[in-house]
Amino acid sequence: MSFSIGRVPWEDAAPLLKNVREKVFICERRIPKKVEFDKKDRHAFHLLVCDDVTQEPIATGRILATGEISRIAVLMAYRKNKVDHKIMQGLLSIANELNLDEVFIYSPLENVEYFRKFNFVSAGAVFMEAGMPRQRMQCSLADIEKAKYYLSH
C-alpha cells in the first residue's frame, strides 16, 4: 500500500480533511461535530494523506503554532499501515520549521502509552473533554530527535 502526504491549507482542503475526521471522530468516537470542528482549524498547519491508487483521503493531523498537535485521524482500514507514524513525522517536521522547543497533545487516556513511545511525558492532571478522559502530554523537540527510530518505521 502506498500513500502520499502533504501539507494543505484549511481553506482549500477542508472538505477532504472533514471527511476523514467525521468518519473517525464523529462516527467512530461519537465526538460532537461542534466540538470536533473548532476555530483553530483556520490557523493550524494541516497534513492530508491520500491513497496513491484511489486518491481518496485516508488520514489527517494538525499542529498549531503553539506546538499543540491534534486531530490525528486515520481511517480504520489503513491503521495497520502505520500511517499515523508518517503523520507524526510530518507534524514534528512542521514544529521544527516553526522553531518550537516543545510540542504537546491532549491525549485520550487510552493513547497515553502510544505517545510515550515518541518520548512524550504526562503533564498535569487527567481532565474530561467531550465526555472523554484526557491527559496533556508534552515533549521537547530535542527528546523527539532521540526517538526518531520510532517515527521512521
Image: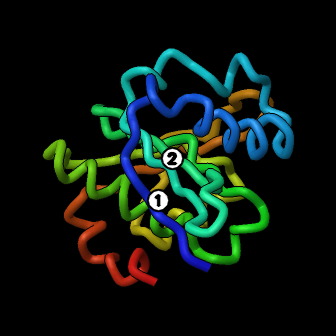
**Residue that badge 2 annotates:** 61
- Please name the colour scheme applied to the rendered image: rainbow
* Left or right, residue 86 beside residue 53: left
Residue 53: x, y in percent?
Answer: 62, 69
* Left or right, residue 93 beside residue 40: left
In the image, farthest residue toward the left = 99
Mark before the other along the chain sequence, 2 or 1 = 2
Q: Residue at x 70, y 31 (%)?
A: 128
Residue 56: x, y in percent?
Answer: 65, 54
Amino acid at the residue labelled 2: Gly
Amino acid at the residue labelled 1: Ile
Give the numbered dot on residue 87: 1
Label 2 and label 1: CA atoms lie apart by 6 Å
- Image quarter of residue 16: top right
- Image quarter of residue 125: top right
- Image quarter of residue 89: bottom left
- For label 2, the SS is strand
Residue 116, above or below 49? below
